[in-house]
Image: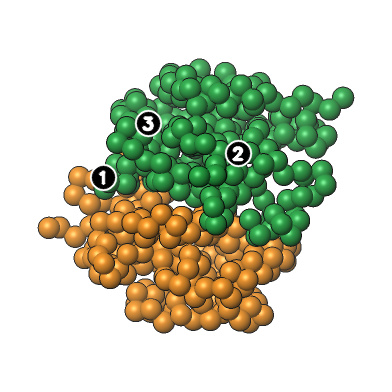
Chain colours: A green, B orange
Amino acid sequence: MAPVKVFGPAQSTNVARVLVCLEEVGAEYEVVNVDFKVKEHKSPEHLKRNPFGQIPAFQDGDLYLFESRAIGKYILRKYKTSEVDLLREGNLEEAAMVDVWTEVETHQFNPALSPIVFQCIINPALHGIPTNQKVVDETVEKLKKVLEVYEARLSESMYLAGNFVSFADLSHFSYTFYFMVTPYASLFDSYPHVKAWWERLVARPSIKKLGAGMAPPTPKA
Amino acid sequence: MAPVKVFGPAQSTNVARVLVCLEEVGAEYEVVNVDFKVKEHKSPEHLKRNPFGQIPAFQDGDLYLFESRAIGKYILRKYKTSEVDLLREGNLEEAAMVDVWTEVETHQFNPALSPIVFQCIINPALHGIPTNQKVVDETVEKLKKVLEVYEARLSESMYLAGNFVSFADLSHFSYTFYFMVTPYASLFDSYPHVKAWWERLVARPSIKKLGAGMAPPTPKA
C-alpha cells in the first residue's frame, strides 16, 4: 500500500497538526512540499486537493481531504487500535469531551495564542513585517484568561478530555511549540498544571521527533 | 428519563446549532434561558456549565458539555439510528467528508458570512451599534469567493459531504437563516446550486420548526 501523502511544509503549524497524528499511530507517510514562493498553493493541481488554496492537503489513494482537524480525525479513526485510540468514539462521554476540548482549541485557545506566534515569529521572520506590540499585548491578556480555565481543567484531570491523552491535546501542539520560543513563553509558569501538561506532551516521541524539525525561522536581516 | 437541557436563548445562532440536531433526531429537550441582561452567563452557576461564560451549554443527567459543534456531535451519536445517521462515523470516507465540510463551515464559511449578520442585524438591533458598511463590503467579497467553492462542490453532490444530508449541512443553518433576511440575501441567487441546497435545507421539518421561532430582532428606534 502506498504511503499517505501530506501536502505542505512540515514546519507549518497546520501541517504539523496532521503529522503528529500520523506519528502517534505509526503510519507511513510522505510529506510533499508546496512552494509558496512560486504560488504553488494556488496552482490548478493544488486547488484540486484543497479548493481554498491552503495547506495542508492530504491524499490516501483516491481520497483527497483538507482542513487539518478533519484530516487528523480521519487518520486517528483509520489507524485506531485498542492501544492507540485518540478519539474514543466508542465511548459516548469520552468522545464528547474530546470534541469539547478540540473545539476549545479552535475557538478559545488558538485565537488567544496564535496571534502572538504570528507577531513574534512568523511575520518578522517570513514576511519581513515588524511585530505589532499592541496586538501582542491585547492577545496576552486574552491568553491569560484562557489559561486560567485550562489551569482549572488540568487540576482535575491529566489531559484536557480526561485522564487519557487525545486528539484534543495533540491539536494544541504546533502553535504552542512555536509560542514556547517567543518572549512570552514564561507566561505558562504561572499555571503549573498547564505547564506540567505541556511537559507531558513534549515528552511524547511523536512531538519530540516533529519538534526536532521545527526550529523557528530566524528573522530577516 | 429527564429530557436533556440546552442553556441559552433558542434564537441565538450557536444555540440553534444544537437545537437543529435535537430536532433532527427527535429527542426530547428543554431550553433554559440564560439572561444576558443580568449577566447570568457570567454567574458561578453558568460558569460551571461553560467555564468561558458563553452559550450554549448542555446537560444530559450528570454530563455537562459546551461548544455547540461538540454538543451537536454528542446528540447525533447518542440518538443515531440506521435512518438518522448524520455523522456517518461507521464509514471512514463519509465521516471524513462530514468532518471536512464541518471544518469548512467553521474556518471559511462562518468568518465570511457571520460578520454580515452581526453588522446588519445583531449589532443594530440588540446593541444599538450602527452597521459598519466597510466591514460589510469587505466581507461580501470574501463570501463570494467562499460561495464559488461551495457552488463547485454542490454541483457534484446534493449536500456538502456527499449525496446525503449531514451535520456539515445542518451546522450552516442558523447563521445562513439570519443572513437571508439581510439586504445581501440575493447574493445566493448567483450560485444556483448553493441556492438549491439552501432551499432543500429550509424545507426540512427541523429547520421549518426552529426558523418559525427565529424572527430577526427589530432595530432599536
Q: Nearer the viewer, mark 2 or mark 3?
A: 2
Q: Nearer the viewer, mark 1 or mark 2?
A: 2
Helix, strand or loop at mark 1:
loop
**Separation of residues labelled 1 and 2 (CA atoms):** 32 Å
Find disc 1 in the rendering and name its residue: A91
- Tag shown at residue A165: 3
Helix, strand or loop at mark 3:
loop
| Percent x, y of residue A169 | 44, 33
Question: A13 above or below B210?
Answer: above
Dot 1: within a 10 Å radius of its alpha carbon, few (fewer than 14), some, or many (20 or more) residues?
few
Q: Residue at left 19%, top 60%?
A: B3
Kindly identify which chain the residue marked by label 3 belongs to. A
The part of the image, by quadrant, that contains residue A185 is: top right
Kindly identify which chain the residue marked by label 1 belongs to. A
Dot 2: within a 10 Å radius of its alpha carbon, few (fewer than 14), some, or many (20 or more) residues?
some
- For badge 2, the amino acid type reads Glu
Q: Residue at left 73%, top 51%?
A: A41
Question: B93 above or below A30?
Answer: below
